[in-house]
Amino acid sequence: IPLWAGAVIMGFRSKIKNALAHFLPQGTPTPLIPMLVIIETISLLIQPMALAVRLTANITAGHLLMHLIGSATLAMSTINLPSTLIIFTILIL
């Protein structure tokens, strides 16, 4: 979050006109301007939370996959070692 906040703050400080242009598309009707600015501001503030949830889900899925492959290899190693190594190699690819 600090890196994201720093990037947003630096973007606003260095090029305020370009940063504010992201809040409002060109050619927006005048009555929609206040609502769009509020929606875009909320979107900007929620973005780090959404990215954190996605990162957590990806890390969890990776750990789960490693655990499943490890468990399958361990369970199969009692059956036949050469076939276990072949299947393990295929799963890793």
Image (spheres, rainbow, N blue to C red):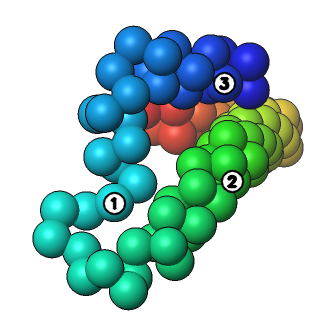
Identify the residue position indicated by label 1 in the image.
24
48, 24: nearer the viewer:
24
Q: Is residue 41 visible?
A: yes
In screen coordinates, is 44 left or right of 25? right
Q: Which mark is residue 10?
A: none
Identify the residue position indicated by label 2 in the image.
46
Identify the residue at horizontal 67%, vertical 48% (top origin). 45
Identify the residue position indicated by label 3 in the image.
5
Identify the residue at horizontal 39%, vertical 82% (top origin). 32
Identify the residue at horizontal 64%, vertical 60% (top origin). 42
**Up-down: is 85 above or below 32?**
above
Q: Earlier in the sequence, mark 2 or mark 3?
A: 3
Total marks in image: 3
Q: Report the quarter where the N terminus lies.
A: top right
Residue 41 rendering spot, x and y as whole percentages: 58, 55
- Inter-mark Cα distance, 1 to 2: 17 Å
> For mark 3, does the 10 Å Cα neighbourhood hold few (<14), some (14 to 19), or many (20 or more) residues?
few
Amino acid under label 3? Ala
